Structure formats: structure tokens, C-alpha cells
Amino acid sequence: MAKRNGKRTDSTLSTSAQPGVAPAKRKRFIDYPRAKHTGVRRWIPSWKLILGGFVTFILVLVGSFAAAVAFTTIPEPNDVSRSEKTIVYWNDGESELGRLGESNRISVPFDEMPESLRYATLAAEDREFYSHGGFDPMALVRAGWNDLSGGTTQGGSTITQQYAKNAFLSHEQTLTRKARELLLSVKLETEVSKDQILENYLNTIYFGRGAYGVETAAQAYFGKSADDLNLSQSAALAAIIQAPSAYEPETNAEQLEARFNYVIDGMLEQGWITKTEANEAAFPKFKKAKTVRSSLKGTNGYLLESVNREMLRRGYTEEQLTVGGYRITTTFDKKDQAAAVDAVANTGISGEKGLRIGLTSVENDTGEVLAMYGGADYLENQLSNSDQATGLAGSTFKPFALAAALEDGIELDSYWDGNSPRTIDGYTLQNESNVSYGTINLLTAMEKSVNTVFVELANEVGPENVREAAIRAGVPADTIGLEADPTTVLGTASPTTMDMASAYATFANRGEHVAPTTIKQISRGGAVEYEHTVERDRAFDTEIADEVNYSLQRVVTSGTGYAASGIGRPAAGKTGTTDNNRSAWFVGYTPQVTTAVMLVKQNGKGESTTLYGTGGGGSVHGGAYPAQIWTSYMRVAMSGLDYEEFEDPPNRYGSSYNSYSNDYQPSRPSQSPSSSSSSSPSNSPSRVPSQSPSPSSSASSSATSPNDAAADNATRRPQPVRP
């Protein structure tokens, strides 16, 4: 030590005070990049830095989560009961058509809930409920791993999380909603007792059948109060919670029973019931579901149910539609729908016992369904005659055979044997009333709906190609009876009117298929979730479709569908009638709109029976009541639309027939049964098909027309047939 100026000084002063010596560097709090290393190692963090960073991240995450929980508020319990029904509008987006869903909720206190019900719910949904703090990390990991590994989809949400979502949040599948759900569930666990959470959950969860909470669920499924439920009934209700629609006992009893056994096994595993109780717990019997709501009264009930089915196909759940507050704008036009109802009512036969009349009308270029007639009153009969009931298609399948033949190079002016009866490839058949037409071209065969020609044609191009053409046009591949055999062309398949309207619209669209839809827009809370966009699939070449359209126009102007010419503008279409008169069809279209009409009849056992005698007449053909309904409806549906004509086919068929604007009014079919199989609106049918060879002497003298004949040949305007 030394003294300088009377003060002690240290001989080991910092070198920074010594001239010519560089000062020492201060040690950094975070040594990165690493000072003692060079090259690549300089940029590799040390284990201390990694550990410190991880710990810091966890502390920040926990702190942020704690702060978020602290600032999260729990809505008032009364908010749980709030729900908003889904409103359905006509295509103007303003006029209300009706509402979907009907919900009920009655709260019961915790001590009135059977212990078996509480434990069954825990066994089904959250076995660790009383031990976790609002969420179960291991359950989330298990669910995530199971989903990634391709196992059965599992939920990772606890009962607290489910309650938070159902009571206070939306059902949207977003990370933001999941984060809010997690925060709210933890907050609930800090302020509300477990028993209270379980009570609120069981009073708000959806059980299906419009029932919210265990009290209404007990009444809906078992016709008793919740406090009277036994072990088996409690386990069954708990099993339903996961997916009410998927576990509806009337439609999915097998799946529900498997889930029921899972719940019972879980209760036994957790020690909540004894082995004896588990063995004695039999799958219970359920009360029949009430499927009809008073809000569906009348013809509009079929429209609402069709929309409901389409929403379910789009992935929405029954619960979402019941209380989700959606706003659905349909494609249904209020004016057109009223016209459809009036057209059916004006026939005077709609009230006949067992008679089903179906109608579907679609806009060709969009696929939007403008009108549907599913029946007189949904409350009386819940099967829609428009998009659920089916009927043998009859001769309405002949255009598909024609399209396949045209693709195969066969022309409309090719000649065929139209005699009757004939045996073709081992199959014996005849024309309507066994009328023989001699040698006729394919165009005339379509006008007169000559069976023998079209069976030979289908045999020539191959029944599989006829079937495939129908599917391309829009007939569902799984349609009942849609097989590749010689009778396919005669309509042994049984489609719906929506199927046939969609298929014929493909021809009207010059070969482009547009799938039908009843929904234009879906919105919720002011935000649009879905907007209908048109998707077109090329089914046939334009030239092929134009030739089919040309031939089907001739059916209207001078063939079996003449009654449809009464709309006063270009139209094309085809009639259809089947053996034993078990169905009658008319499917017709303009360039803008396609409409299919079907009549079928059932006996008291629900079995198909003949239409003979309907309306007090004889046989019912496609050119009679179906074409009459079609014409009455289309006059209104086409009002206000531009007058449009079909494109002419490429060449060779002569001048187009453009005299569509006649004032023909289809007459009411005879009120007394006729002695022949023809059911023409006329009283003096012609015995000679216009511009075709006369019927042979073997033909019935009273037979006036080929298959489906319903219009008076004497009043038809004969058309030139190219030799």
C-alpha cells in the first residue's frame, strides 16, 4: 500500500487507468452470439441459454394465461337459456317462409337428478371431472394422437369446457373460440363448484328430439321425469349426449347400444356401480319420437323439411339448426310455389285416397329449385312426393337412350321397325295397345313413344350406355331399379321428380349438368357463411343435347305431349306411363325452366297400385293429368321471363317447327272409365298416327296412340317426316 497526498492508494488499480492498456470488456447478461467462440460454434446457443429461454417462455405463458383468466368474466347464468331459432326465407331474402327447430328446456336442481344419471354422464363424457381444473391435458393429447393416427374421432373437451361452449360461446370451429373456451372453463372452476357446473351442464346440454336438459330429455325419450330415471335409462341418455343425431334410437339403435355399453363399463370401472348392477342394466325401450311440428303445417312444411335435409347434408347439426340463429335464403319462388299448389288443386283429384302427386321445378342454368309440391299437408304425411317419393319412370327414360344412340353415331332420320309385338334379343314386348307403326324413323318413334323401336335402339347401343347416359344427365346412380338391362329404356327405374327435373335440365342447358339446390345463402350474425355458386359439368356435347331437344320439342308439338304446347312458347318434354298404369309422368322444359310432374298411387298397405279409375276415368297417361298440371304451372312460372327458343340441331332435319303459340287448353280427362287403355282428354281420338304408316290390322281398333298417348291426334298439327 502507498499513500499519495495523504490518502491510501491500491497498487492493483484497474489497468484501465494505466496508459497503453485496453480496458476489460463487461460481461454480457446474455452471451449470444457467444464471445469465446468463433465460426459456427459462435452461433450455437449454450445449454444455459436454451434452458433460460424455455423457463422464461413458460413463465411468460403462465403469467399471460393467469392474467387472461383473471380478466375473464363469466356471463350471468340466465344467458344460458338464450337461443335463437333458424329463420328460412323465400328467394327474395326478405319474406319469411318458416323456421327450423323446436326446442324445450326445463331446469331441475342437482339434488333431484338421480345419482346414476350424474355418474353415467361422467362415465360418458369426463371421468376425471372431479380431479382436473377445468381442462384435461392428457385427454387433449390422447384425442389429438387418436385423430392423427387414424383412430376413432374423440373429443378432448371436459364437461366444464363443453358447458362453457354451449352456455356462453358459439359452435364455430376456430382457434379463437377454443382459446376462449379454455379460459372460461378455468375461470368457472375457480368461482363455481363442481356440483354446480355439472348441474348447469345437465340442464343445458342438447339431447336430441328438441330437448335441452335432462328433464325434457327424460320426457322425450322415456315419458317420465328425470328423477324417476333408472340406471339403464340414465346410461342411455348419457350415451346420446356425444352425438344426438347419430345415436337416435329409432334410426341408429345398434350404434346407441354400443355407446350404452361403453357407459355402463365406464361406471363399473370407476366403481360407481357394482358388477351385479352392470350385469342387470339392460338396453332400455324408448318412447316413439314426435317428428311432426305444428309449424310445418300445409304444403310449405315440405319445403322447410327439404331445406333442413340439405343443411344436414352440408354438415350442419340438428342442434345448430335448432338454436343457432341462422338465416337461410332459399331458392323457392313464392309466386311459383303458389302456382304449383294451384295447378295440383285445380285437377280436382288431389284429395283421392292413396294418390300421390309430386312436382319439382328448377331453374336450368343455376339448378335452383323454384317450386316443389310434396303433398297437401306435411302434418298428414311426412314423405315428400317431390324429393323423396319415387315412381317408375316409364317412357321418360327414352331420351337417355336417344342421347346414347346419337353419341354412337345413330341419327334421328335412321329407320327402325315399329311393329308390335316384337321379340328383341329374347325379350318380347309390345307398343301401347299393341299398335304397329311399320318402318319409321327415330324422330317419329320419339314423337309417338314407340316401345319396340327404343328397346331395339337400347339393345343396339348397349343397356349399360343407356344407364350411364341417365346418370350423366343427373339421375342418381343408386336410384332404385336403375339397372343395365333391356327394360331400362322403358323406365323400370324409380326416380323422384327432383331427379328427373335435374336430368332434363341438362338437355335444356345444352348438355351441361347443374346439381339442384334449395339454398341460395346461409348467414349467421350478419356474416355470410355460404353463397350458392353454380358449378357446371359437361354431360353431353352441345350438338347431342340440341338433337335431343329437337326431338322432345316434336313430342310437344305433334306427339304424346301435345297438351304442354298450351304455354304459348317453345317447350320440349316427354310423357311416361308404365305397365299396369302404376305411374304417370310428364317432364318438360323451356330454355329457362324444367318441371317434372309425377302421379303414383298406394293402397292401404302402402303398396304401389294402379292409377286406373283416378278421377273417375280409365287409364291415366303422362299426357293427361301430369301434362295438365305442368301446363297450368308453367304458364305462371314463365310469366315475366323472356321469350326464348331452343337452338336448332346442326342440319338435316328440315325447317324448325315454330308454331308454338296456339291457344290449346288441355281438357279434363273423362269422368267415366273408358273401354280402352287410352286416357285421352279428347272424345274422338284418331286411329292413325300422323305422318306414319297406319296401324296393322292386328292393332286394337280403339287404340288411338302409342305409349303415353293422351292428346287428341285429330287436333294435332301433323309434321313432315324426312323420308
Image (cartoon, grey):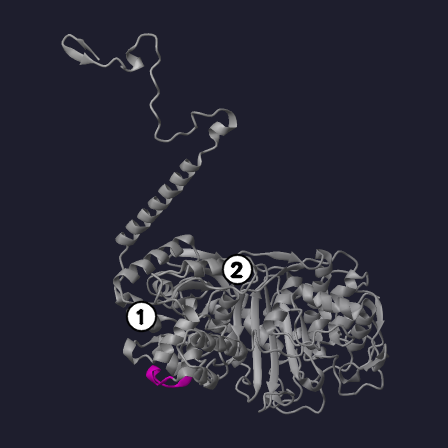
On the question of residue 259 being in view, the answer is yes
Depicted 9 relative to depicted 264: above or below = above
Secondary element at tag 1: helix
| Residue 397 percent coordinates (x, y) | 70, 72
Q: Residue at position x 46%, y 72% from top? A: 304
Specify the farthest residue to the left: 6
Tag 2 residue: 147
State whether residue 565 appears in this view.
no
Q: Which is more toward the observer, 605 or 178?
A: 178
Q: Position of residue 338 (x, y in %)?
A: 48, 73
In the visual, does 225 lie left or right of 265?
left
The verdict on residue 222 being magenta is: yes
On screen, residue 541 versus residue 605, left or right, reads: right
Check residue 680 for magenta coloring. no
Q: Please name which of the two marks, 1 or 2, marks the residue nearer to the observer.
A: 2
> Quarter-wise, where is residue 479 in the image?
bottom right
Whole-number angstrom distance, CA of label 1 to CA of label 2: 29 Å
Q: Going from the N terminus, do you reach mark 1 or mark 2 first? A: 2
Question: Identity of the amino acid at label 2?
Answer: Asp
Q: Which residues are magenta?
A: 221-229
Residue drawn where x is 41% and y is 61% of the image = 171
**Pointer 1: what residue?**
200
Q: Amino acid at mark 1?
A: Asn
**Nearest the camera: 168 or 358?**
168
